[in-house]
Image (tube, rainbow, N blue to C red):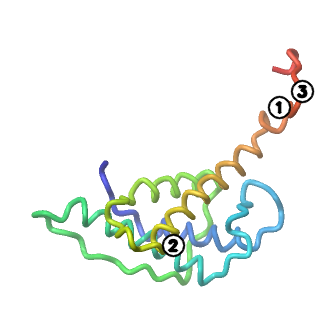
Amino acid sequence: MSIQIIEKTVFLAVARKMFEASIAVKVNENFYPCCREMSSERIIDIVASWHTLNWDSFENEYSEGEQMPEREELLIGITPPPPTAVQFLKWLHCIRYNINHNCIPRQNTTDLQDILFLDRLIRDVSKAIIEQLPDYRAALWSTYNLNHL
């Protein structure tokens, strides 16, 4: 596993998408049930936690004998435009890949809960994207028709 530091702008864009998802009412590729009615404060806390865990993972991986870059604080204020659903999903996968469980103390249940939420968000976004695909929408639900395959 090769941990890399993820750009701050990625975390800001992820937070922006989560802010929008927290108030979404239309069910489409941008509707994620786990974000519904989530407070802005909770979104900021969870994205900041992922940012910190990414840095912790990087430092844990490369701390011996290497010059470490200076850790950047994540301040969520003005955020970039939200990404597409597919780009959002790709960044969530990137964040998940670049967090090493070994750097989380077992007694730190908050960080573990934040990782579990990330896993759930990845599932929700994946499901939302798949359900909007034309082939998926056209596929049969509870019947089998050889001409429809």
Residue at 61% in and 51% down: 86
Q: Position of residue 12 (x, y in %)?
A: 52, 72
Quarter where residue 78 is shown: bottom right
Query: In the image, what residue type sits under mark 3?
Result: Thr
| Residue found 39% across the figure and 73% down from its top | 107
Q: Dot 3 corresponds to which residue?
A: 143
Q: What is the number of the mark on residue 47? A: 2
Question: Which quadrant holds the C terminus?
Answer: top right
Residue 139 has which mark?
1
- Placement of 147 over or under 33, stated as above or below: above
Q: Nearer the viewer, residue 19 or 81?
A: 19
Q: Amino acid at mark 2?
A: Val
- SS at badge 2: helix
Q: Give the crowd class for mark 2: few <14, some 14-19, many >=20 residues within 10 Å.
A: many
Frontmost residue, 94 versus 77 = 94
In what element is the residue under mark 1? loop
Task: Judge from the rendering whether residue 14 lies leftward or rightward of residue 61; answer left or right.
Answer: right
